[in-house]
Amino acid sequence: MRRVPILLLLPAMMLGAAGCRQQPEGTIKAIVIGDAQPTVADPARGPLSPQDAVLVGNVAQGLVRFDAAGNIVGGLAERWNVSDDGLSYIFRLANMQWADGRKITAKEVARLLKRQLAPGSRNDLKDALGAVADVVAMTDRVIEVQLVAPRPNFLSLLAQPELAILRDKEGTGPFTVKASGAEGLQLQRLLPGDADDDAPATREQVSLSAATIGPAIAAFANSRADLVLGGTFADLAIAQRVKLPRNALRFDPASGLFGLVPMRSGGTLDKPEVRRLLSQVLDRGNFIDRMNVPGLTARATLLEPGLSDVPAPVAPAWFGVPLGNRLAALRADADRLLGPQKPVIHVSLPESPGGAELLREIARDWGALGIQVKWAEEEGDADFVLVDEVAPSTSAAWFVRRFRCATVAVCDPQADELMDAARQTPVPAQRYALLTQAAARIDDAQLFIPITAPVRWSLVSARVQGFAGNRYAAHTLTDLQQPPGRN
């Protein structure tokens, strides 16, 4: 097993805050875990990094946006209506201007939205928005989004940073970038009258930067940062080793996918019964216990409980039987399916403490069948790769379409046909039935080996009262010093 280098964090953690320049009174310092400073990146050019997503979501709001608790609130749109048939969303834009004083119009917003959905766009949410038929400016301040079929979760997609309204890397708030320096970007909350010299002082100021995991935690531990965002299972153990203030480590009840995806068609592992065997022998509970994340539970199905458009999934019968009671039968199945010479399986995981721990767990569990597990040096050498993604909505469609033939190496064409039929039908009940059938086929072929939910964590100081975990793991920088519900 490949050993992940130990991060030399302890010296940084022991440094005191003496000599560090204090942030201006009232300024909240936020750090996003990442290896490059945040930029206002164009979502049409490809997936946003975690640090870019935080910046874009806070300086370039969409028609709607998330509040601290993950609820939908107005962004560019001051109000909206949904038609009775669910096929038309009409938004009335607030009376707003670009930084150069030019008025924001519905025609321009429609054009910028359609650019993110165009055939050449590499926007990470483009497929999830396949039901959009057109975006039309009805008047100077009214815009309509027309759908081919109802999508009850449509607003949560529009609130994602990927659908922020950007013009030449310029957004409309709720923050604006006032300065950039060694300590990061200095953001100020956009308030009515900001451009007027007689207007009151800006109420909110945030310093936003990015740092790798060691310096980010050190800054928080030494009171040089008030908020650290973007933690995952990969680096959780590092945060758990550091003495932090009580209740500083917060977890999101994140929704999404965390599990293994096969990467090779053909060969021994490209058999559903072999992949089912590998899934059944995983001791998910042991891995979850070692992570010590409140409320985290094991999963054995693609779909998760709590999705808005399908019934709660039914776990397979074996899932409720202790592994010790099933192991002898699983070993017999392994001998029958794989023979005396068991394969060596290469798994692609993050080079991190969390990745190393997960590899140890997989190696122990699959090793019980006589299978050797190794770290994949490159993703292209892997038999399985870890998927760790937060869902952008509560729709089952996102979970299912993640495994369509256009995006994965091993797929089920019949599941694709069910997905396509679900996308086109205007009847909600029929759509949900088709998605459930597609999910069942993916589970039956074990095209995804679920383990648990994505883990997303943050570090939150006592100064930050307006922080709340949410299923999207999306955190606005607005109202951080206001208790939730009072913004």
Image: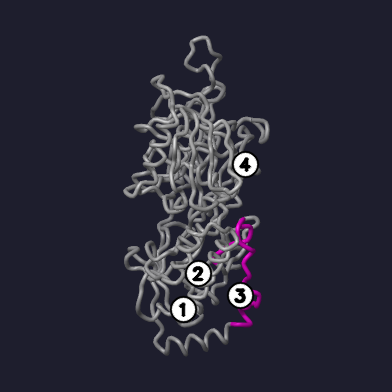
Kind of residue at badge 3 = Pro
Q: Is residue 484 left or right of residue 4?
A: right
Quadrant including the N terminus: bottom left
In three-dimensional space, the C-alpha distance between marks 3 and 4, rounded to whole angstroms, equals 33 Å
Residue 69: mark in rendering: 4
Mark 4 burial class by Cα count in 10 Å: few <14, some 14-19, many 20+: some
**Does the segment drawn in magenta span residue 323?**
yes
Kind of residue at badge 1 = Pro
**Which of these two is toward me, 412 or 21?**
412
Residue 423 % position (x, y): 48, 58
Kind of residue at badge 4 = Ala
Residue 158: mark in rendering: none
Kind of residue at badge 2 = Ile
Residue depth check, mark 1 versus mark 2: number of the one nearer the observer: 1
Residue at the disc numbered 2: 449
**Which of these two is toward me, 365 or 69?**
69
N-term-proximal mark, 2 vs 4: 4
Residue 443 % position (x, y): 52, 71
Q: Secondary structure at mark 3?
A: loop
Residue at the disc numbered 1: 272
